[in-house]
Image (tube, helix red, strand yellow):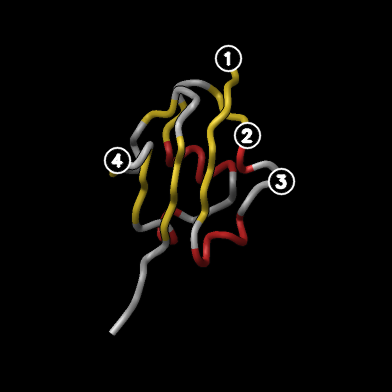
Amino acid sequence: METHIKLELLATLKRYSPDSPEQFRIKRGIKVRDLLAELNIPEYEVNLVFINGQKGNLDSILNGGERVGLFPPLGGG
């Protein structure tokens, strides 16, 4: 069964943004790592996963209706 999430790709990950990130269609029960594969985002490019403002990980399961934020590794100094 399909449903939607709100997808936010930040910084260097924006280049992978789909056409409709506000209503991105997913299969209910998909893992974040499978979402990355659908978007052609290499796992090593994602450092932080946030789901509804809470820290998640690549094995977190999405059931639809979530806000998913993906962050690349950030450098600074």
Question: Which amino acid lies under the numbered mark 2 shown in the image of this protein?
Answer: Gln
| Position of residue 54 measured from the top left corner of the image (x, y, whole percent) | 29, 40
Question: Which amino acid lies under the numbered mark 3 shown in the image of this protein?
Answer: Asp
Q: Nearer the viewer, mark 4 or mark 1?
A: 4
Q: CA distance from mark 4 to mark 1?
A: 25 Å
Q: Nearer the viewer, mark 2 or mark 1?
A: 2
Q: CA distance from mark 2 to mark 1?
A: 15 Å
- Quadrant of the snapshot with the C terminus: bottom left
Of the image marks 4 and 1, the number of the one nearer the N terminus: 1
| Position of residue 59 measured from the top left corner of the image (x, y, whole percent) | 34, 36
- Give the labeled residue for mark 2: 23
Dots 4, 1 in contact, CB < 8 A: no
- Give the labeled residue for mark 4: 54
- Give the labeled residue for mark 1: 1
Of the image marks 2 and 1, the number of the one nearer the N terminus: 1
| Position of residue 3 measured from the top left corner of the image (x, y, whole percent) | 58, 22
Residue in the picture at 46% in, 37% down: 67
Q: CA distance from mark 2 to mark 4?
A: 20 Å
Dot 3: what SS? loop
Residue in the picture at 44% in, 61% down: 45
Quadrant in the picture for residue 20: top right
Disc number placed over residue 9 in the picture, else none: none
- Pointer 3: residues within 10 angstroms few (<14), some, or many (20+)? few
Residue in the picture at 34% in, 54% down: 48
- Quadrant of the snapshot with the N terminus: top right
Q: Which residue ends up furthest to the right in the rendered image? A: 19
Dot 2: what SS? helix
Q: Nearer the viewer, mark 3 or mark 1?
A: 3
Dots 3, 1 in contact, CB < 8 A: no
Q: CA distance from mark 3 to mark 1?
A: 21 Å
